[in-house]
Image (cartoon, rainbow, N blue to C red):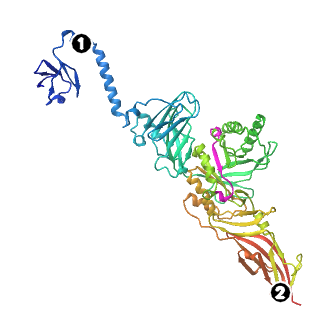
Amino acid sequence: MAKVYCRFNRVRVECGADGYELDLLNRSAIRGRHWHIGRPFVAYNSGWQIRTMTETNDQQTSKRRIPIWVWIVAGVLVLAIAAVVLFLPPLSLAEQIGGSYTNLAGVAYFHPDGLSVLAVENLNNLRVQVSTIPREAFLSNLAGEQWQIAHTQIPSYLTPLSPIFSIKTRGEGQIVAEMSIPNGAEPYERLALYAWNTESRQWEFVPSQINPIRQVIQFYPSTDSLDVMAVHVEPQVPDVALVVSEGGDIPDARYGFAIVEGVKINETGMLVGQTVPASASTIMLLIENRLGGVPSYSDTALQAALSEQIAAAVGGNAGVVLDFAWGEGYSDFIAALSENLHTQGKRVEVVIRADDAFEPVLPAVSGSVDRFWAAPGDNPRLYLENGGAQETLDKVVSLVDRSQIGLMIDAGLVESTGNYGAASSLDTAVAAADGITVVEGYADPDEVVIEAGTLLPLKLDGPLTEMGLDLAMGLNYLAYYDADEQVRYLYFGSASNVRQRLEWANLYSLNAVAIKGIAHPDAPGNMINGVSAFLDNQTVDAPAPIALAWKVLDETGLEVATATGDLTLVQYVLNTSIVPGQYTVTASFNEQGREILIDALAVVVVPKQ
């Protein structure tokens, strides 16, 4: 086959064989090339064209009849498409043009970047389309103008972990999506989903469930278009509130956020009690409606009456914290109360306890509530690993944005049996030891008179069976039998246990903590140190073990004999080899440097006959 050799002539290349010519669009593309001649043809390569010169005049005339504006429009379109392709991020072609919709009738859709979609309602009419924006393209601002804006608007405490999945649906029905847990997602307690809202230009929390066994995050897209990604919610410095009890006071002026107790709702729907006085810059009123209160809020007249009473009780304070049982009509009541208080510039905060039926209601009230206080329970054992607190917090953070969640704990004296726990007092500890009694046969128990130089056996006659320090929790405790012969435990609060429990707020990146038991008359003075250690990321030593202490005091109050030790000192022998006179024998618990008086017994020592 012969070769054609061509020469350049301005914008035309003339070829020297069989009447062929080339229209040159790109001179450099043809220079030095050889082309084989076959039958007449039109070929395109590197921007230049070969056509025959032996075409008829009619053929050439017909081609020239295409209006020049058509060629101009076509050229503009070609350039526009080339520009779009050039400046798009390095995605696959299917991703750049959006892909097609997949019918979900009886099948699941799988995207190779780690997302599956399945229809759970209306299987025959739902279709889905999924595309992705790579995480690197998003973070490098190479994903287009819309995602540059989204990148600037992402809160500083959110760290993107996954691609952005754009999920679009057609048809009516519900789908469930599962995103593979991305690399670097541990700890899972901080893992969450957020979606970009193009209208508000904000990242919004998406409720989801994490399945660490299957390594997926499950969620239910609620709109026909969702742009969602997995993130880590990084810890922030939380707000710190102290719950102030009757007779208590805030021990450190740095903590000026107080939640004051004292008001409850009775069975008629009336507020009873008085708010505990507190000196703080921000005061929230705690109102309780648990056992003994109203069980349902479905009555609209009750809703209105409660709303007005609560608004009046709040007065000049910052707002209200509702520790209510979640009964029927709860979400409607919260919405009405919030509308009332928000117009007055007051806050509405809600306590969530582990046994509340909050899961179906929580998303519905989240728009009306300024903060949720997750309260896993009062028993300190719940806050050990796999102790129960984790389950409660997992549920709450799966339903509500963490910027709306705080952790509420009762770090004071708690009485517990099994997983149950309730606030207690020092009176319970005293009752466990009961009081000092004289061993039968040694003296009259009502008026103890004994000769000098003899021995007087004494004992504590209560149901106390055990006491000591639980190192795992950093808490002193007593164990005793109740009236039903069940073993109960009484845990004393400590700074180290406060620090330990508050670490759960850090693990889940919650935005606030509230501690009951510090601003309380029974609290040891150093318990506030646990809060400071938490904020400063410091450790706190466990307290010294609790001990029994016996003292013998003369008439002037001078100690003439002492004994301190463990539970073996439940019995004590008084040696009366002392000067005859009036004496007082006391028994106490020594706990974190304080004496908790159990009982005192008057003893008269007379000269030996």
Q: Where is residue 489 shown, x and y percent of the image?
A: 72, 63
The residue lying at 63 percent from left, 55 percent from top is: 255
Mark 2: secondary structure? loop
Q: Is residue 263 above or below residue 575?
A: above
| Viewer-side residue, 373 vs 101 | 101
Q: Is residue 36 above or below residue 604?
A: above
Mark 1: secondary structure? helix
Q: Nearer the viewer, mark 1 or mark 2?
A: 1
Q: Is residue 243 above or below residue 495?
A: above
Q: Residues within 10 Å of mark 1 (few under 14, many from 20)?
A: few
Location of the N terminus by quadrant is top left
Q: Is residue 254 above or below residue 589?
A: above
Is residue 296 on the magenta stretch?
Answer: no
Query: To which quarter of the image does residue 413 belong?
Result: bottom right
Left or right: where 387 falls relative to 298 = left
Q: Is residue 134 visible?
A: yes
User: What range is drawn magenta here?
Assistant: 364-382
Q: Residues within 10 Å of mark 2 (few under 14, many from 20)?
A: some
Location of the C terminus by quadrant is bottom right
Which residue has dot 1 on it? 64
Which residue has dot 2 on it? 454
- Of the numbered discs 1 and 2, the one sitting upstream in the chain is 1
Residue furthest to the top: 58
| Viewer-side residue, 102 vs 58 | 102
Which residue type does callout 1 highlight? Arg
